Every structure is written in C-alpha cells, then in structure tokens.
Amino acid sequence: MWRWLGVLFALAVAVAVTRALAGQDWSVVAVLLARRDGGQVGLLLAGALLAAAAGPLIGMLAWRAVLRELGPPVATVRLLRVYLVGFLAKYVPGKIPGLVAAVKVGAANGVTVSRMLVSGTVTTVLVHLTGLTVGLLAGVRVLGDRMAWLALAALPVLLALCWPGLLGRLVGWALRLLRRPGPAPVLAGRAVRAAIGWQTLSWLVSGVHLWLLAVAMGADAGSALPLCVGAFGLATVLGVLAVVVPDGLGVREAVLVGALALLLPVPSAVAVAVASRLVTTVGEVVVGGVALGVVEVVLRRSSAVDAAVREGSGLVEVDRD
C-alpha cells in the first residue's frame, strides 16, 4: 500500500510542479531580453537561477544543524532526501499530503515524528526571524520611520545568539501546550548559532537573484544590492505570514514592487517582481528534482554495495565452515 501511495504522491508532485511552471508569466523573459544584449541577459538569468537554487540548499544546512541535536546521527544524504521530499511537496495542494509524505520518508530514514516536529518548528521560526532581520537592509529605504517594528525581529535573533538555551525552553513550553509527551529539547548553543548563520546566508544568497534581475532591467548595481537582498527576505516572509493568500501570491509582489520602485520605473519594477516569482519557482523545481534524483541514485548504489558486502561475508563464513 505504501509503495502505491508513494507512486501516487510522486505523480501528484509532478502534476503540481508542472501546473506551477505553466502558471508563471514567461513573457517577462522577452521583456528582459528587450532591455539589453541577449548574451548579457542570459548570463544574468543564469546567475539568478543559480542563486535561487542555492539558497534553499543552504537553508537545508540550518535544518540539519537543529535536527542533529535532537537524536542519533543520520547520514547527510538521508537528511537531504527527507528535506527535498518536503520541499517539493509544498507544490501539492493542501498541507496533509506533504506532511504525511515527509513523516513517512523521515521514519524510513531514521527521523522520528517528534524529532521532525521540533526541528521543523525551530527552523520555521528561525526562517521567519532571519528573513525579517535581513529585511532591515531594505527597511530603512522602503519603510522609513515605520521600520521600528521590523527591528523587533532582530531582537529574538540576538537573544538566540547570546542565550541559545532560551530557544529550547520556548519549544518545550510550546510542546507542553500541545500536550506532546517527552522532555524539553536540548539545543546546544553551537547548533542554534549554526542554524541562524546558515539560514541568514540562505536569505543573502537567495536575494542575489533579485539583484541580478534588477540589474538586467537597468538598475544601478551598487545601490541595488542591499535593497534587493533585504527586500526579498522581507517580501517572502510577509507573503508566507499572509496565510489567507496561497504562497504569498500578490503580497510578496506588492512589497517587491514598492522596494524596486526606488530603483526602477514602476513598469520595470513590476516586471522584475514577476520575473522573481518565475526564477525562484524554476530554481526550486530544478534543484529539488535534480538533487532528489542524485540522492536516490547514491542511496541505491550504497544499498547495493552493502548487500554485496553482506553476501560476500556470508560466503566467507560458509567456506570457513
């Protein structure tokens, strides 16, 4: 039954990813090509895709840093399989199928449900807080005097860096509210700081794609870099927090256009915001699909080698007898 469910889930992911790609506005590529030489735009688009693909993989390292503190060690290739399945599952409508798939794959690779719950909760909190903190790079120019509330997001990050034990206590308190049995998770300071560092780097790298797209549309490279990197973190988190809108559609673009309008004419800013959605979707799908395929090949070869070793050991024992 689980094998057939796995096949059906894989098909559902493929259909959902195809629909997500087909639903993008590909006409913005022609808009970018009209702005400058095709070779230059091609290089900028390739760099944007690379940045958009590398960001989520760096974010996986933040999740791994937390997960490793909550139980016995698990091989990185197996953790990558669990992460990528959950990563691609977000394109399937509804939260339940992706949650069930992530739990099943996690259990098959040595990660318990409680461990998945705690590591996922901690990492999600850090994703939002670090995203808003990186958003400070754009907050001064976008929000002006109203950016004080945004600075509050940096306070928990600073507290977690200075007193990482607080994070474990807060998670333990939340688990008791949810009536989850077991002791409060113990998160070492090194793991929390590593997770914050990796996740911050993930936002910085991901934001580079928006900068490259803005430069392709004619923005000044020097002044655009901090604004674009900060605006991407701020817009993405605000889009995720707008739970009534699927994947932050519209909210994210509105924030990006507001920031990019400081660098470009409004029509160009809209084109860059739309292109950002296209590039991040393509980058996530490509890196998710390719990386998951590589992981499966590595695991199958590893299993075949282990089976051959066990078989060889059995033959040696028979000969000795």
Image (cartoon, rainbow, N blue to C red):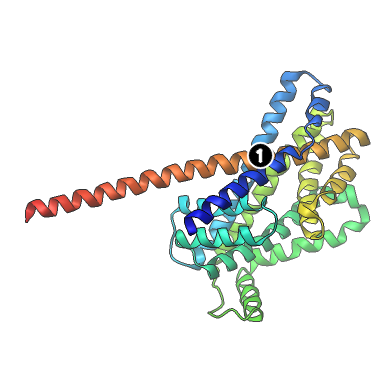
Q: In this view, does 311 lie to the left or right of 126?
A: left
- On the image, numbered disc 1 is attached to which residue? 283
Q: Residues within 10 Å of mark 1 (few under 14, many from 20)?
A: many
Image vertical order of residue 45 relative to residue 225, above or below: above
Residue that sits furthest to the left in the current view: 321
Residue for point 88% across, 42% down:
257
Give the quadrant of residue 260: top right
Which residue occupies the foreground of this view, 307 or 11?
11
Q: Is residue 136 left or right of residue 290?
A: right
Q: Is residue 221 left or right of residue 102?
A: right
| x and y, in percent, of residue 147 in the image | 87, 57
Q: Quadrant of the C terminus?
A: bottom left
Query: In the structure shown, which secondary structural element does the residue marked by tag 1 occupy?
Result: helix
| x and y, in percent, of residue 23 in the image | 76, 40
Image vertical order of residue 3 relative to residue 171, above or below: above
Give the amino acid type for the residue marked by disc 1 in the picture. Gly
Image vertical order of residue 245 relative to residue 264, above or below: below
Q: Can residue 221 be seen in this view?
A: no
Give the quadrant of residue 262: top right
| x and y, in percent, of residue 140 in the image | 87, 50
Q: In this view, does 23 lie to the left or right of 300?
A: right
Which residue occupies the foreground of this view, 16 or 128?
16
Residue for point 62% across, 54% down:
197
Tally of marks: 1
Residue for point 35% across, 49% down:
303
Q: Can residue 119 be seen in this view?
A: yes
| x and y, in percent, of residue 248 in the image | 79, 52
